[in-house]
Amino acid sequence: MKRKTLLMLLLGCLSWMGLSGCAFSQEPMTPARFLEIVGKPSDAVPLVPQLAAVPFWTNATISNVMTYASGKVFREEMTQTARTVVGKYIVFTVQSKFYNQRMNAIATYDEKASALKVYGLYGNGHGGDVVTEGTAVYDYAKKTYTITSTYGDFKETTTGSYTDTEDSAKTVVYKDGVLAMTREVKTWPVISGK
């Protein structure tokens, strides 16, 4: 159960990003490539235009509430940082107190698909890593977004909205076509000096 919760939490990272995603090189996002991008430092290279419009905060606080079909509720407050890498990626890092570890997500623009993509990485429980992929669609005029993702037996749909001071998202997760859980996430920027 804890591994499934970790997966749900990691995939929640996809919506916590203030989005709360194959790159211009058109290389597939493998676990090794994911780790390479996450391992790169932040830089001052301007974001490509397709990513420059994506709203995100470099430091944020997250409230995450996951409600499982069984009625079990999991709550966690987390911190998140975001940074840009080579103008092609926004790398989000969430620090989970419950799991006592960092989890990462990457947003990028897939030129071939003409879409924003969001990636996460999790252990498959058999000694390997699996990359998850979501597609993000924004309505910048209405300040809303939708993220969809399918992985294994799971399908997720996140709908969210944002202002200058808050991002609010709700995700429904189905396993084999049956509702497995809902996730409600609120994200706020950390204001310096407060």
Image: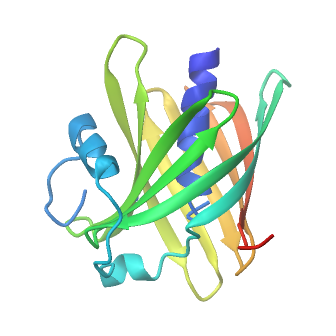
Residue that appears at 38% across and 75% down: 51
Residue drawn at x 55%, y 75% is 55
The residue positioned farthest toward the bottom in the image shown = 141
Quadrant for the N terminus in the image: top right
Residue drawn at (14%, 52%) of the image: 27
Q: Does residue 175 appear in this view? A: no
Residue 28 lies left or right of residue 15; in this view the side is left
- Does 193 sit above or below residue 169? below
Side of 109 where 180 appears, left or right: right
The residue nearer to you, when weighing 194 against 174, is 194
| Residue 129 in the image: above or below residue 44 | above
Q: Residue furthest top?
A: 126
Where does the image place residue 49, in percent across and percent down from the top left? 33, 84
Residue at 62 percent across and 28 percent down: it is: 100
Q: Where residue 23 appears, x then y in whole percent? A: 23, 61
Q: Is residue 138 visible?
A: yes
